[in-house]
Image (cartoon, helix red, strand yellow):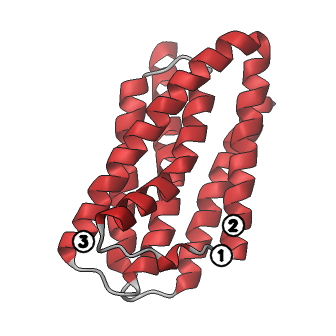
């Protein structure tokens, strides 16, 4: 029974982190969606974001496993510190605002740039997760699913919403990552 609770806790952690990471794609998607996005463009952007939300944490996990071996017992504190700093950065950037609005989402280069910009955080979280044992396939697929879904939702909702909601969404995602960082440290 204890193992089932542990597995449920791991699944809930993965889901919360996936949603937190997807908030960045959601908030920036709202900003781009406000400029007007065709359905085909929204789908293309969502698929690219999903792909990057799988690849970036996977690369991060591989790097984190290497760093975890090097750091030994300190890995837990470094991992918590990384999540804390990443969450704080997301909160600060949501307050300052982001300059991604100038990306041309109708070109492949613009889609790739947008996807990479909202997936960089996933790499850092992947490094953190790589220092621990876990179900990496489930993790990266969940990150990809939520990253793609939330970017499409942001693009679609951007037509009728103000920019400030998107900024609050990124701040909420940052607060979740910041809290997980503190939990790892303490």
Task: Return the residue found at the far left.
Answer: 40
Mark 3: few, some, or many residues within 10 Å (few <14, many ≥20)?
some
Pick whichever, 11 or 1, lies toward us: 11
Q: Residue at x 69, y 66 (%)?
A: 93
Where does label 2 land, which residue?
A: 93
Q: Is residue 95 visible?
A: yes
Please report contact status of discs 2 and 3: CB closer than 8 Å, yes or no.
Answer: no
Please report contact status of discs 1 and 2: CB closer than 8 Å, yes or no.
Answer: yes
Q: Position of residue 10 (x, y in %)?
A: 50, 29
Q: Position of residue 167 (x, y in %)?
A: 60, 74
Q: Quadrant of residue 75?
A: top right
Reply above or below: 36 against 137. below
At mark 3, the secondary structure is helix
Where does label 3 land, which residue?
A: 41
Q: Is residue 9 visible?
A: no
Pick whichever, 104 or 48, lies toward us: 104
Mark 2: few, some, or many residues within 10 Å (few <14, many ≥20)?
some
Q: Residue at x 54, y 40 (%)?
A: 123
Where does label 1 land, which residue?
A: 97
Q: CA distance from mark 1 to mark 2?
A: 6 Å
């Amino acid at each position: 029974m204890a193992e089932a609770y542990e597995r449920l806790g791991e699944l809930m952690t993965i889901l919360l982190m996936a949603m937190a990471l997807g908030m960045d794609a959601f908030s920036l998607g709202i900003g781009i969606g406000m400029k007007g996005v065709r359905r085909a463009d929204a789908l293309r952007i969502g698929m690219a974001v999903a792909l990057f939300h799988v690849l970036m944490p996977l690369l991060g996990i591989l790097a984190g496993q290497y760093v975890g071996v090097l750091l030994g017992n300190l890995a837990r504190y470094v991992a918590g510190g990384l999540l804390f700093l990443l969450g704080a950065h997301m909160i600060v950037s949501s307050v300052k605002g982001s300059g991604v609005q100038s990306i041309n989402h109708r070109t492949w280069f613009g889609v790739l740039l947008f996807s990479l910009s909202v997936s960089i955080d996933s790499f850092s979280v992947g490094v953190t997760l790589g220092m621990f044992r876990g179900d990496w396939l489930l993790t990266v697929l969940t990150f990809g699913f939520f990253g793609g879904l939330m970017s499409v939702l942001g693009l679609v909702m951007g037509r009728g919403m103000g920019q400030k909601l998107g900024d609050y969404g990124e701040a909420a995602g940052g607060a979740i990552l910041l809290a997980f960082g503190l939990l790892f440290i303490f």
